Every structure is written in C-alpha cells, then in structure tokens.
C-alpha cells in the first residue's frame, strides 16, 4: 500500500520580504532538504510583521499541510512580534527557559558584548512548545503540535535555520511520519530550446507512468530536464527511474552536456580532477565572476590556479601581455584580444587550460558594430585554442552570468574533445 | 482624507520553486517596484503546477488583496497548465491573438529556429483577458478583472516579467488606483549588534508617529536601519521623514557608515568617483568575488582597474611578487602575505588603492592556529597600508561573502580617513 503523501507549508515572516529588501533563499534550501526525506512542499507563503496576517497564515496553511515551518520574526528588536503571537495561538504563557538563557549568556560572553534585557528575553519561550536548541545563535527553535499538524518556528538567519533543520527538525519529522521516497534524475542540455526538446521527446514523455513526472527547467539559454518519481519501494523506484533516465539520455544525446544534477563549475572541477589538470581565467567583461563560481566549490584550489581580471587596458597589457596595437586596432572586444589574453594567461601561470573573456555588458559602452551584449570568449591550452563570439540581450548582471556559464560550457566541451565548430 | 491602502498579493507558480531548484528573485523585485508606486505587498505565495492548487490560491488571495500578480507557468512545454486554468477561472474560451502570433513568428524568424505547434499555441489567449504584449519573449501577459480585483499573469522569466511590469503593469495600476506615497530612508551601521542599537535608540523609536515605522535589517554582521512612512502628501511626508532621519543619524553617528540605501560596492564606487581615483584587488580566499561585486556596477570601469586572483602559491609569487620565504615561513594566511600581496598589486597596476585578502574559507584547510574562517585583509595605497585579522564562523560561501563585505568596508573607511585602530 502506498504511504499517504505528507505535505509541508513554509511560512516566512518579515516586512523585508514584502518590500523586496531581502531575497528569500531559505525556502529553496528548506524545500530541497524536505524533498530529500520525502516531504512535498505544497505552498510557500510570505507575510509581514503583522499579528493578524501571521495568525491568518497559520490558520490557512494548516488546511493545506501537516507540517508548517515558520522562519523569521524572532530577532531581539521591537519589530518582532512572532513569539508572543505563537504563545497566544497555541494557548500558552511565556516562561524563561534556563538552558536557553545559559546558552545566550555564553554567546555574549564569547563575543565580549554587553548583555541587555532584550537579549535575556530571547530565552523566554511559550510553555506549550518543545524547545529546539539553536547552537548557532540566540533565538531558539520552537515546536508546537495542534490538531494533526506540527508547527516549527525558526529564526530567519539562514545559517541558524540550517543548523536547526539539520540537527533537529529533519530527524524529528522522519521519526514522526512514515515518509515515501522522492527520487530525481537530472540532465543538462545546451544549444536547443525547451519547445524543441519537448517535441523531440513527446512520445516517450506521454508514455511515462503516472508516478514519474518530467520537468523542463530552462536557465542561461540551456535546459535542464528533471525526472521525479515518488513511491515506497526505494529499490524498485530507483531501478525504474534509471531505466527511464537512460532512455531519455539516448533521445537527447546530441544535445546533452551533463547527466548529473550539478552545476557547470562543479562539472568542470570534476573533469579537471579526473585528469589531474588545472585551469586559470583571464576575465575582462565577466569581472571575476567565473573565478568566484569556481572558487565557491570546496577543494577547488587543487585544480584552480588563479585569475587576472583585466578591466583596464594597462592591466591587459602589463599583466597579460596583450599587444597595445591589438587593443588599438582591433579593440578590447575582439577575437584577437581574447586570444592574446589567453596566451598571456597561460604564459603567466602554470595552468593547463585557460578561459579568456571580453565583451560589452551594458547598459553603456555599446557601438553599432559591437552592441551591448557582444562577447568574445577564448578557451584552450598552450597548443590549441578556439574563440567564439556570443551575443546576449539582457541586463548587465544577467549578461555577466551568461558569459560565465557559456565560457565554462565551452571549456568543458573543449576538454571533453567535442566538435566545437 | 487618507487614501485607502491598496494591497497586492504575488502568486508564483511552478514545481521548481517547491523543490528548491529555483530561488524566487522575481517577487523581491516586484515588491520593490510596487512599493515605489505606493502599493503594499501583503502576501507572497508559491504553489506548484497543479490545477487545484493554483485555483485555490486565486480564490484565497482575492480575499487578501485587490491586485493579484501571477508569474510562471506560461512556457511552451507540457508541464504548464496555467493558461487553460485562467481561461476557465475567468469564464472565457481560448482564441488565437493575431498580434501575438505575428510577434512570436517574428521572434522565431530572428532566432532562425523552426516554429512548431507548441510555439503557435503561445499566441492563444482567453477571450476574457486584455493582452499585454511581451516584447522580450513569446508568452504574452494577460490581465483579468473579477469582483474588485485585478489579476495579471506574466511569464516567470525575470527579464520578460520585468519588461512587462515596467512597460504595462505599473503604469496601468497607477491609472486604476488612487495610490498613497510610501517613502523610505535607510542607513548602514557596522560594528554593533541589532539589540545594542535598539537599546540605544529606544526612546526615540517609541516616540515615532504611528505612520512612520523603523525596521532593523541585519546582514553580514552589519545592521541597516530603515524608516518607512506612508501618506498622501508627498512633500509633507518627505520633510517629516527627513527630520526623523536626521535625528536617527545623530543618535547612531559613531556606528554609521553610509546614510543611503546603497550597497558597499556602490558606496565605494561613488567615493572613488568623487575623488577621481581608482582601485584594484588581489584576492586569494575571496576568489574574485570582490571584483565581481565591483564590476556588477554599471560604469565601474572608470574606477576599477582589475584583479589578480592568486589561488595558487605560484600566482602569488609570479604575478604579485610575494616572497617565497614569506609564504613558507609565515604561511599564505598571514599579515605579511596580505601586505606583500597588496604591495605587489600596486606595483603591477596603476590603481591608487588596493585590497588584498587571504584566508581559510572551509570546509577543509583549517589548522589549530588558523581555523576555518580565519581571514587576513590589507587595504591601502603605495604609501600607507593597514592589515586586519577577521574571523567568520559560517559555511564557505557565507565566509566568502563576509570577507568581501568587510574588506570593502575597511577600504571605504580607510579612504574616508576613519580611525581604524
């Protein structure tokens, strides 16, 4: 018999979410973790620091889900009203929790900061909750039960919320509910649009069993295809999903780049590690963003040597050795310049492979023959390099992100030995 | 007489939001823009690609707000069910819109991609909607009216949604509703916690008039304070808010860094522009992230020269001229190394100011005397430099972000002439 699907709702609290001052990254992380243990997030709701709005959200979400996770609204300042509200909602009264108080006191001692009434108040909790100790901060997590629902309130600071989820909330949910398995398989395609792919695999897609779903996730001009299956028998589920995934890979073979759910920078890192080789970048228009993506991966120092961000002409000339004449005659955004940047980079460092970028990211700086969005990328080794002209039509930040993605894709395929003409 | 406050709800549609594959950046941008024209976002809800969930969200949000904005669920592939649902919800039937069809055809011609049935279907709309032409993509925006509410459905692609909002939706809302003014004033403090600030300004805060609210927005170990005022008389509102803001600035003077709602990289750029000076960075542990933040600002090429990301020892030595002995004896994460990196950077480029960073970002690489999170930063000119040791206790990405923020803060205060001992 199939387990009943358990649903969660995530409520994020705070005016800063409603005026757009803060981008909510918590919900996405929480959804990923819940998914891994077989809980499906049905809804995410953001409300302001307003008593009746939070109260109403609690009422409404309990109609949609059995697990209600709340983040935010627990800080020490006056704009926080969540804790007293939770106390009323679940019919309790506030009491001082001695363990939390000790913990808060220890934190302030360590930080060497004076402890004031507001901080002491953080150790007060409703007497109807189970306290979840927050090792990473002063505001404790709180768990409540009402009707068939579990409610957990956590601070909005991502680092603290994550600690509480991993140490307390997820293990607790796994104990409380009999959860199904949710499995995913993801691949990345490049060079074709969503609708073209959909048409190509249409017959296979409509023949998929009901418990396996396909999703199209377009980003950066590439499309990820994700298969999701839900059920109780993990082994059977996994085997069946692998068979469908193999079939999907065959159908899109000519457009597939990576058959794992990893980023391009992770794929590039894995490939270099497997070959025991290294890389470096010479970035003009991407301004260090490729370096940032690569160095965000733990352990990247093994295969990543470094970067020269050459924004000014003199850095292109003095550090990378680009010819003054090339810059004057061909311009900074040209095939010749990116090729010389790449050569200079590989002469300057001991890296095996290099990426060089130069382009017009906007909003200013465009000309008739080099409009905003024009980018030249070169990738290669000391022996062999290729250069490509790209064109993007978005805003500055998006153009930078696209340049980085396509430059890494190009090097990845170059190392793989793909035909890039 | 006070205008009635107009509320909006944002509904984002898509399974990718509920499994955490996509971070919702659309809602924050939309909230900012709505705020500017005096609309308060009361709730944001994310639901999956499931007919009854979307239907229910439409019902529920119409109880909360007069303006309901929907994004997502309009792509050409089979997992999109939003358009037929909207057609049923508002009681219409699907018809082909000739203007949209022409527009879609033109896009495909320009891209030189074959146009298939799925693409043609994108030009179908419910006959009960007002079509909002989407210049940036194939899926049109659609406006519906029902009861006292306006509903607008837009594609989830950020670039397309933004175009529709700016060109169509915002002007239309301003015409339809008599909207109040919402004004903000924001300042940034560093070096003290949220609760300490709250205590310091407590008396002033509780004496604020009811229509002016104060919010504490902590991030990167710094705290932003934001004053918000709502009303009809813009001039009076602005004058009154400025008076309170002046008072607030005086009360937190010793901790205030910036008295505008701009980022550290924007503040640093403005300061350099005002002095007609330039900067560069030598980044080890921050891996190019400071360069990325600085180059994300349009026009930054005027004051930003470039960066050397020296991840490997040989790049530190060969490009920046750090002594081999310093690295061997003192280690890469040391005051001596960041000072030599800074000197090398300013010898290599023509920049007036420099930042150098070196640290252990984790999760690996920590030792007893240099645990994960240990960072050395140096900032200065050819004549004078200062170095500071910092310590962060978060995950790799957060440690990188904190290093960048605090390094930029340090240079900003150095240029300002603050006492940094």
Image (cartoon, coloured by chain):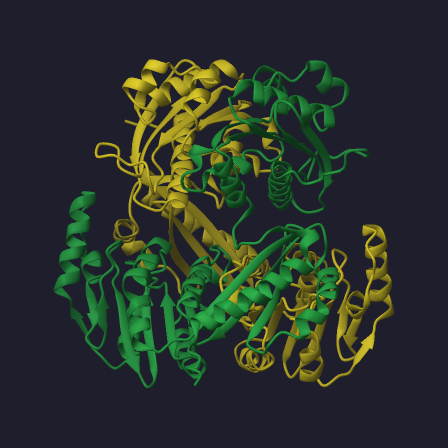
Chain colours: A green, B yellow
Q: Quadrant of residue A66?
A: bottom left
Q: Position of residue B206 (x, y in %)?
A: 31, 60
The residue sitting at 50% across, 40% down in the picture is A269
Q: Find residue B200 and report its horizontal and vertical position in percent.
A: 26, 49
B192 lies above or below A171: above
Determine whether B250 is above or below A219 in the image: above
Residue A196 visible, this orientation: yes
Image: B323 above or below A72 = above
Q: Residue at x 43, y 86 (%)?
A: A1
Q: In the displayed structure, would residue A291 be above or below residue B153?
A: above
Nearest to the observer: residue B22 or residue B421: B22
Quarter of the figure with the C terminus of chain A: top right
Please indicate whether residue B14 sits to the left or right of residue B347 in the image.
Answer: right
Residue A282 in sight here = no
Number of callouts in the render? 0
The answer to whether A39 appears left or right of B173 in the picture is left
Q: Which of the 4 image quadrants contains residue A297?
A: top left
Residue in the foreground of this view, choosing between B332 and B225: B332
Position of residue A354 measured from the top left corner of the image (x, y, whole percent): 58, 29
Residue A41, position as x, y percentages in the image:
46, 71
Q: Residue at 44% of width from left, 65% of height from top? A: A31
């Amino acid at each position: 018999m199939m387990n009943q699907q358990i649903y969660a709702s995530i409520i994020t609290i705070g005016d800063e979410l409603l005026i757009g001052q803060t981008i909510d990254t918590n919900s996405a992380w929480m959804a990923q973790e819940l998914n891994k243990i077989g809980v499906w997030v049905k809804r995410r709701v953001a409300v302001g620091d307003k008593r009746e709005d939070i109260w109403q959200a609690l009422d409404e979400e309990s109609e949609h889900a059995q697990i209600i996770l709340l983040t935010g609204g627990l800080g020490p300042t006056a704009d926080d009203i969540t804790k007293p509200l939770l106390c009323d909602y679940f019919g309790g009264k506030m009491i001082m929790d001695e363990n939390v108080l000790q913990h808060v006191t220890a934190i302030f001692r360590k930080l060497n900061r004076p402890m004031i009434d507001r901080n002491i108040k953080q150790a007060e909790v409703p007497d109807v909750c189970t306290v979840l100790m927050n090792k990473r901060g002063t505001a404790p997590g709180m768990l409540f039960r009402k009707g068939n629902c579990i409610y957990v309130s956590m601070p909005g600071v991502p680092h603290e919320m994550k600690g509480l989820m991993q140490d307390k909330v997820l293990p607790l949910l796994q104990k409380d509910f009999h959860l199904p398995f949710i499995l995913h398989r993801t691949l990345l395609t490049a060079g074709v649009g969503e609708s073209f792919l959909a048409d190509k695999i249409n017959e296979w897609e409509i023949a998929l069993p009901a418990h396996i779903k396909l999703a199209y996730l377009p980003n950066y001009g590439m499309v990820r295809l994700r298969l999701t299956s839900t059920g109780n028998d993990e082994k059977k589920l996994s085997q069946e999903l692998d068979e469908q995934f193999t079939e999907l890979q065959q159908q899109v073979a000519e457009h597939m780049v990576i058959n794992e759910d990893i980023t391009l920078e992770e794929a590039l890192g894995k490939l270099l590690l497997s070959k025991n080789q290294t890389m470096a970048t010479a970035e003009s228009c991407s301004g260090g963003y490729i370096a940032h993506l690569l160095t965000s991966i733990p352990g990247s120092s093994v295969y990543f040597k470094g970067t020269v961000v050459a924004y000014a002409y003199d850095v292109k000339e003095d550090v990378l050795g680009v010819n003054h004449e090339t810059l004057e005659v061909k311009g900074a955004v040209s095939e010749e310049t990116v090729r010389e940047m790449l050569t200079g980079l590989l002469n300057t460092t001991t890296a095996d492979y290099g990426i060089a970028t130069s382009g017009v990211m906007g909003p200013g700086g465009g000309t008739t023959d080099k409009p905003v969005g024009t980018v030249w990328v070169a990738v290669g080794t000391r022996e062999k390099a290729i250069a490509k002209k790209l064109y993007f039509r978005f805003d500055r930040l998006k153009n930078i992100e696209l340049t980085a993605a396509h430059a890494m894709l190009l090097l990845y395929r170059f190392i793989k030995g793909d035909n890039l003409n």
